[in-house]
Each structure stands twice: as C-alpha cells, then as structure tokens.
Image (spheres, rainbow, N blue to C red):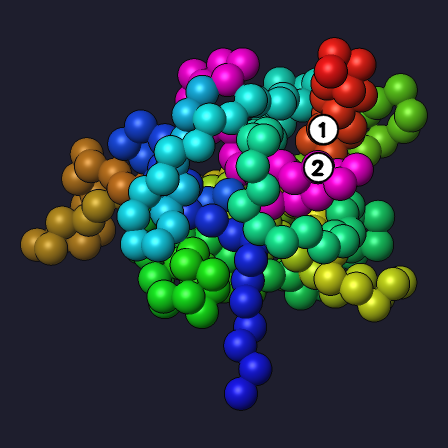
Amino acid sequence: MPINRDFRSFQLKYGNGTATAFSVEVDNYQFLITAKHAVPNIGHSGQIEIFHDNKWKAIAVTAIYCDNDAIDIIALFSQASLTPTFSTNFGVTDLYVSQDVYFCGFPYGWSNYAGQINNGYPLPFVKKAICSAFGFTKAHTGMIAEQIYLDGHNNLGFSGGPISFLSKDTGKQTIAGVISGYHWQAEPIQSKKNPEEAEQLYYQANTGIIVAYNISPIIAAIQKFILTWKQGT
C-alpha cells in the first residue's frame, strides 16, 4: 500500500505556544511560512522549535515580513532544508467563491507522531472548508484579494497552516493562503433557572468563519529577500 508522505507541514513551537508551519521553495531556496502572531516579537531573527523524531529541535531562523504589516504571515529562512524540494503553485487567481479547500495543522498542540511514515515528522490533521468570500484591498495595481474567508471549523493550533485547493485551470494543487484564526462572537451565558435572562457572562463562540491571508504578498517578500541576500553573499 502506498504511503502518503506530507513532507510539508510542521508542528512549530515558539516560547510556550505551538502552531503550524509549512515549507515552500522559491528560486530553489526553502522557507518556512507560518502566521506572524505565532512567533511574537521574533524581530529580525530568532530561534524556533520543530517537532521531529518525537522531540523538539531548535532551528535558528531569519524572519521575512510582508510589506503590509497588517498581513498575518511571516516567512522564516534557515540554511538547512527540512524537506525534499518539489515544485509548488501559489496564489488565488483561479480560486473562486464556493470552491472546496483544505487546510492542515496541529490543533491544541496535538502531535500525531507516526515514526518514519512522514520522515520522522508528525502527521497533521486535515480539514475541509469552502471559500466563502474575499477581503479586497486597494493597491496601485488595482484591487487585490488580501484576505480569504472560509466556511468551516477552525481550532486553536491551526494558525500558520496552508490552505490548498485544486485549480480548475491547471489541474494542480495550489496553496492559496495561510490560516490566521477564526472570527468569534461574544454569546451570553444563560441561567438554567430562567433561560430568558442572560447573566453578565459571555463566551467566545466560534462562528465557523475562518480568517486567512493570501500567500502572494509573502512570496513577493521572499523574492525580494533572496535578491538582497544574493547581493550580500
């Protein structure tokens, strides 16, 4: 029976928090991409940990940011490649509203370690959603789809995970964006004695609206980084 090796998604740890990261190749250089809020205050460079061979391993990285600081994506560059390299398609050009998409990650810090099935890395959880809407921003080149909203159910720990879809134009799997979180709504906690009277307590209800960001701006930032890095070496 063939084994499906993911080879892309990683369980990331920074400080006391865990999230998801995934690898991409740009101009034959490998980078890790994750949500910016998953590595707070990392600055220009720092150290993250990746779960491998049933333990956390430290990796020194250089941080790369999008030109727009509001975009919740960051790229991390390390001299050492974590996965085999293979071509990947990026972008949302042929992603349309109501299309099925998939995202993966490590909810609640859970680690699905499966020995060498995935080259010593834990297997991520995979979830399905549909593309519900885009959040457009005005740029000098016109309107761009900066945010992607999905109809699905996200959990803590999926932040930084990739969103992929099957392109109808090319027939290939394409990475559209990066999970940032979910929209929550404050809902009142009702009294058991009188359900019509809401007590002054609320909880953060998961609305099922997943918030993600288009991957294209961080790919552009990586390309600029590579250009500068080559000039300095």
Residue drawn 32% across and 35% down?
17
Which quadrant holds residue 177? Answer: top right
Q: Looking at the image, which is closer to me, 212 or 201?
A: 212
Residue drawn 56% across and 58% down?
7
Residue 111, image x and y in percent?
33, 56
Q: Which residue is mark 2?
A: 29
Q: Is residue 3 left or right of residue 110?
A: right
Q: Are marks 1 and 2 in contact (CB under 8 Å)?
A: yes
Which quadrant holds residue 94? Answer: bottom right
Q: Looking at the image, which is closer to me, 180 or 118?
A: 118
Q: Is residue 188 left or right of residue 232?
A: left
Q: Amino acid at mark 1?
A: Ile
* Mark 1 or mark 2: whose residue is earlier in sequence: 2
Residue 82, image x and y in percent?
54, 45
Query: For numbered disc 2, what is the local secondary structure?
Result: strand
Label 2, residues with CA under 10 Å away: few <14, some 14-19, many ≥20: some
Q: Residue furthest bottom?
A: 1
Q: Looking at the image, which is closer to me, 190 or 185?
A: 185
Reply above or below: 218 against 153. above
Q: Is residue 50 left or right of residue 7?
A: left
Q: Which mark is residue 74?
A: none
Report the magenta residues as a range. Answer: 22-45
Q: Amino acid at mark 2?
A: Tyr
Q: Looking at the image, which is closer to me, 22 or 102?
A: 22
Which quadrant holds residue 148? Answer: top right
Residue drawn 62% across and 37% down?
31
Reply above or below: 67 against 108. above
Q: How many marks?
A: 2
Q: Which residue is mark 1?
A: 222
Q: Nearer the viewer, mark 1 or mark 2?
A: 2
Task: Quadrant for the C terminus, please.
Answer: top right
